Amino acid sequence: MARPTTETELVELVRRARSTGRRVKAVGAGHSFTGVALTDGVLVDLRDYDRLLAFDPVTGRATVQAGIRLADLSRRLAERGAALENLGDIAYQSIAGATATATHGTGRRFGNLATGIVGMRLITGDGDVVECSADEEPELLSVARVGVGALGLVSELTVQCVPAFNLHAVEEPAPVDEVLGDWEGLLDDHDHFEFFWVPNTRWALTKRNRRTDEPARPRGRWERWRNGVLYDNVAFGAANRIARHRPAAVPRLGRALPSAGRVEYVEPGHRVFASPRLVRFLEMEYAIPLAAVPEALPRVRELVRDLALPLLFPVEVRAVAADDIALSPAFGRETGYLAVHVYRGTPHQAYFRGVEAIMDDYEGRPHWGKLHFQDAATLSARYPEWSAFQAARDRLDPHRTFANAELDRVLGP
């Protein structure tokens, strides 16, 4: 294992590994559910490679080391009156890991996190440093923004930021059929809309966020702790532990879980997007055409009913703008994301395989950091720029210094 703090160290460890025939993988926060960061060679731990190197208030661009966590970067940007354009609902990840796997938030007009990258420094399989931007190696930049760890070690990223903003947030339950019936309207009416369908119920928990110039009206400390920790984590975790041992209790547990009801507040965007997630789970997430969501989710609901699973974890549904990144699941199409979860230790194969079979009917593309059963043969036809990515991989890592079993499966050896 190595814990570098400088780019020179990164270069040296890759060159040493290459000279001895060893493989190299980087790990950020370790949040991915797949084996994408595993290696039998050199594991590069980026926790100390986490500096904000530069911020230009004129252009709004920030240059950071690859290991900086999204939550830490958001706080540092807020101190400078800036923000990332969008975030997912978890901010523990390193920026390199999040962008390499096309991690995303929600919002019809906003792309995944990787779309904000305007510059990169990559260390190739031979230990050379390649810089790419709109002016230098622009075609490589287009491909490398979602690299799945296959193109090299990401050293630095330059991301386009926006002025800091507040979000007017409304969180409330609604019948899931009503939400699906107005799916596109809800997306158009809110900057960031998502919902969570609660299995074995007719209810969805909706999150409706609008960007606003209103002054902050934050939740109180007790309210934040009660809703975000006590209800969503402590009580929810306890219910899942009971459900794992007593599946017949699931309907009663679902009804008994405490709810905050309708909640409305105004806070800085980065505090609204991300929530604490303390309950351990397994997850699979698929990207399908946006317009297919109202048809696909009812099929998932039928699957859940037929499998009679003891599920309490909700199905999360979000939307993302189309982009032009070769291995982005949102390449070339407005995208809806459906994410399914199970509590750790819960049998998941039948559920996840069943959901994947449904997603296959819509040319679904799996999230690169989450569980799925696809391989290079099934995935290649779903990405029009697959060959462009493979050409970049052959150029930057011809000896497969950055390969591992997961990449051999999903990208080919």
Image (cartoon, rainbow, N blue to C red):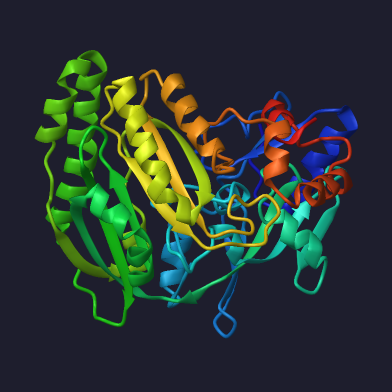
Depth order, front residue of 194/211: 194
Quarter of the C terminus within the rendering: top right
Quarter of the N terminus within the rendering: top right
Please indicate whether residue 3 sits to the left or right of residue 69 in the image.
right
Tell me what residue is drawn at x 36 percent, y 45 percent. Answer: 316
Residue furthest bottom in the image? 58
Image coords of residue 61 (percent x, y): 59, 74
Q: Is residue 111 visible?
A: yes
* Residue 34 figure quarter: top right
Count the marks: how many? Answer: 0
Please indicate whether residue 219 sits to the left or right of residue 27 in the image.
left
Please indicate whether residue 149 sits to the left or right of residue 254 in the image.
right
Q: Is residue 47 above or below residue 158?
A: above
* Residue 410 figure quarter: top right
Q: Is residue 395 above or below residue 168?
A: above
Tell me what residue is drawn at x 25 percent, y 65 percent. Answer: 169
Tell me what residue is drawn at x 48 percent, y 69 percent. Answer: 109
Image coords of residue 320 (percent x, y): 49, 59
Residue furthest top in the image? 245
Image coords of residue 179 (percent x, y): 28, 55
Q: Is residue 90 visible?
A: no
Image coords of residue 124 (percent x, y): 82, 47
Depth order, front residue of 377/208: 377
